[in-house]
Amino acid sequence: MFRPSHFLAVVLFALFASVVFGITQRETPRRMLHYGIYCFVLFSGAAVVLSWVMFFIAR
Amino acid sequence: MVTPQIKNEPARNSKQGFVYLPLIAGWLVPGAGHFLLGKWARGAFLAASIVCMFGLGLAMQGKLYGGAHDILDMLGLAGDLGNGLLYIVSRVLSLGADQVQVTTGDYGTRFIVVAGLLNVIAAVDAHNLRTGRKA
């Protein structure tokens, strides 16, 4: 059984979703790569930022 | 008058045939729609991402939705069905958890649903490539 941490789960989710978004939403390989990286950073960054927001709300 | 017809022939031929084949193939087998169109690298990346996501979902003891008892179950089932043959084979082999019992099982359930939704996006992309809506 695979038991990742919450952060690893977020990173894996962001990686796979970004690959599909990059390939399907852009037409040239260069733009696919850029958009995939952009999506990955947004997915991961949003999770980290929201986690800190929830941390301060819970205090 | 003859020359333009000959030049247009390959373009017309590429539009012939069953245009929904890449859509259906891509839904049943992740990446297959792109493989049919000769987009090998794109298809391989899509297949790897979707199959890995689905496999990790199962490995995390994620739940495969089998019936629709309420609206959330219906949405989950719709997402799971997007996985095509992966979902059907997994159901036949009784893979996945019946009930989410561990925390990672909840992550796994989401992984499986999202893998299905991503597969639908990939299949529609293959259809758009086939119809010429996308290059």
Image (tube, coloured by chain):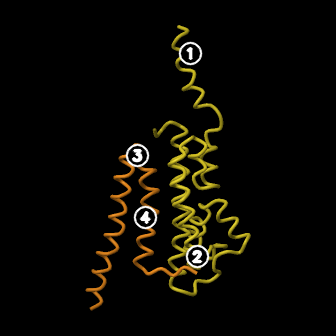
Chain colours: A orange, B yellow
State which tag comes first along the sequence, 2 or 1.
1
Marked residue chain, label 3: A
Amino acid type at image mark 4: Leu
Amino acid type at image mark 1: Ile
Q: Give x and y (percent) for residue B77.
A: 60, 68
**Residue at numbered disc 4:** A15
State the SS at label 2: helix
Q: CA distance from mark 4 to mark 3?
A: 17 Å
Question: Quick check: B114 left or right of A27?
Answer: right
Label 3, residues with CA under 10 Å away: few <14, some 14-19, many ≥20: few
Amino acid type at image mark 3: Pro
Marked residue chain, label 1: B
Question: Quick check: B46 left or right of A18?
Answer: right
Q: CA distance from mark 2 to mark 3?
A: 32 Å
Asked if marks 2 and 3 fall on the same chain, the answer is no
Label 2, residues with CA under 10 Å away: few <14, some 14-19, many ≥20: some
Asked if marks 1 and 3 fall on the same chain, the answer is no
**Residue at numbered disc 2:** B59
Question: Quick check: B23 left or right of A3?
Answer: right
**Residue at numbered disc 3:** A29
**Residue at the spot x=52%, y=18% of the render?**
B7
Label 1, residues with CA under 10 Å away: few <14, some 14-19, many ≥20: few
Asked if marks 2 and 1 fall on the same chain, the answer is yes
Q: Give x and y (percent) for residue B110.
A: 51, 72
